[in-house]
């Protein structure tokens, strides 16, 4: 009786493993470590004082997937494994489609073979494309502007179709907004390879003195201060959302989508200010043109997750900055 966590050495996966273990769940984890390090797994064990089976395995490797399901009785799957860089997906669409889509098909075929029909999937607010109004509700129209987003949209559709073919499956599609922060221990956090694309890891590099200035992409958006607005969510809150989703898939035979966000939008300048306070370091700013493909504002209506899953985000932007900074200074 265990939950299989795919991509469990990654940023959100490792934090979710901690929450699952602390809630007394049994877990089995695999990751091919293409965007993470084995130290994340060691540190999950350190934080929780608990051991669990970890496989260095690729979800594209059917034999490896079947071995995991043979070795363990898997009741639920939380599916984080995937490639996630929007810009890279435009450069390498075939790799993104193959890894994310073929990998999910092999995983779900293996689940079916072993009679495991409960899955919690890492989707993204990117599936809403450019929303016409805010806040975003789950029944808004779906669209995408890049191959990464297309993989999320397609996997959602694949999982819906699987459910329609066999209504004894249970599928939770979790649409994350902008995850950030780190575990308060400073042992696990976000560790992107190379030059990061996302705002918080880039601001951290500026605060550490590894980048000269915070680049603000666009100051003429129709927002409170002209800069882009997003719904930043603490990764520990997000991880706890997966516990609520696991409970839901255990109790329902349904397929449904849930926004995991705070419901509050913060601008780029507000995030810079919050990190300046957390790091006690002033941040030089360079204003740039808008980044291609960006939308002005994006934030969730998280009511459904609260009403149906009984989950809501609790941690503030100040706490996100404090914990991201704590992790960064320990790992620079
Ligand atoms: P991450 O890159 O830190 O974690 C993903 C993990 O999957 C990595 O450890 C990677 O090594 C592993 N992986 C990739 N392909 C694999 C394969 N074929 N076999 C086995 N392991 C494989 O990313 P994250 O931020 O933790 O994101 C987790 C999930 O959430 C992803 O599916 C991502 O698309 C989704 N998501 C992330 C964000 C975000 O901003 N971080 C937002 C919305 C959705
Ligand atoms: C946030 C805001 C930028 C960097 C991406 C993916 C999305 C999801 C989360 C996976 C925007 C601005 C950024 C910088 C800036 N991932 N910005 N200067 O674009 O909302 O979402 O990550 O599913 O799919 O698209 O996040 O952190 O890149 O940007 O001004 O140096 O910060 O314009 O307004 P985004 P982000």
Image: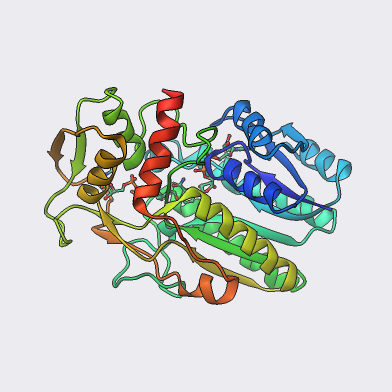
Q: From the viewer's perspective, is residue 180 above or below residue 331? A: below
Q: Position of residue 227 (x, y in %)?
A: 18, 52
User: In the rendered view, does 232 fall on the left or right side of 44?
Assistant: left
| Residue 181 in the figure: left or right of residue 308 | left
> Is residue 170 in sight in this rendering?
no
Residue 132: x %, y % from top left: 29, 71
Q: Is residue 127 left or right of residue 81?
A: left
Q: Nearer the viewer, residue 23 or 301?
A: 23
Identify the residue at horizontal 44%, vertical 48% (top origin): 147
User: From what the image shows, is residue 30 above or below residue 128?
Assistant: above
Locate the C terminus and report the quarter of the image it occupies: top left
Ligand 1 image-quadrant field = top right
Residue at point 36% right, 43% down? 321
- Viewer-proximal residue among 320 and 190: 320
Count of residue discs: 0
Look at the image and name its color scheme.
rainbow
Q: Position of residue 22 (x, y in %)?
A: 68, 49
Residue 76's spot in the image, x, y percent? 74, 56
**Residue at horizontal 47%, vertical 61%?**
313
| Residue 151 appearing in the image | yes
Residue at 52% x, 56% y is 123
């Amino acid at each position: 009786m265990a939950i299989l966590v795919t991509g469990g050495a990654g940023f959100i996966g490792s934090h979710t493993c901690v929450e699952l273990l602390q809630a007394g769940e049994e877990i089995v984890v695999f990751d091919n470590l293409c965007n993470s390090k084995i130290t994340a797994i060691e540190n999950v064990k350190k934080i929780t004082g608990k051991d669990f089976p970890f496989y260095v395995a690729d979800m594209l490797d059917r034999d490896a997937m079947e071995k995991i399901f043979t070795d363990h009785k898997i009741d639920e799957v939380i599916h984080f494994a995937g490639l996630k860089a929007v810009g890279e997906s435009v450069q390498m669409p075939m790799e993104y489609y193959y890894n994310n889509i073929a990998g999910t098909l092999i995983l779900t075929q293996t689940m079916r073979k072993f009679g495991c029909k409960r899955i919690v999937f890492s989707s993204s607010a990117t599936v809403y494309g450019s929303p016409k109004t805010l806040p975003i509700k789950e029944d808004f129209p779906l669209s995408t502007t890049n191959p990464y987003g297309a993989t999320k949209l397609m996997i959602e559709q694949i999982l819906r179709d699987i459910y329609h073919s066999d209504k004894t499956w249970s599928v939770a599609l979790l649409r994350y907004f902008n995850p950030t922060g780190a575990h308060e221990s400073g042992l696990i956090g976000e560790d992107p390879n190379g030059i990061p694309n996302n705002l918080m890891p880039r601001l951290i590099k500026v605060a550490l003195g590894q980048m000269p200035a915070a680049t603000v992409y666009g100051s003429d958006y129709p927002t409170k201060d002209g800069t882009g607005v997003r719904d930043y969510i603490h990764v520990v809150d997000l991880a706890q959302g997966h516990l609520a989703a696991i409970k839901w898939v255990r109790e329902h035979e349904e397929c449904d989508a849930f926004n995991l966000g705070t419901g509050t939008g913060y601008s780029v300048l507000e995030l810079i200010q919050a990190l300046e306070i957390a790091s006690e370091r002033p941040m030089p700013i360079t204003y740039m043109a808008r980044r291609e493909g960006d939308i002005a504002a994006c934030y969730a209506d998280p009511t459904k997750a609260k009403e149906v899953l009984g989950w809501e985000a609790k941690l503030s932007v100040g706490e996100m900055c404090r914990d991201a900074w704590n992790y960064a200074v320990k790992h620079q």
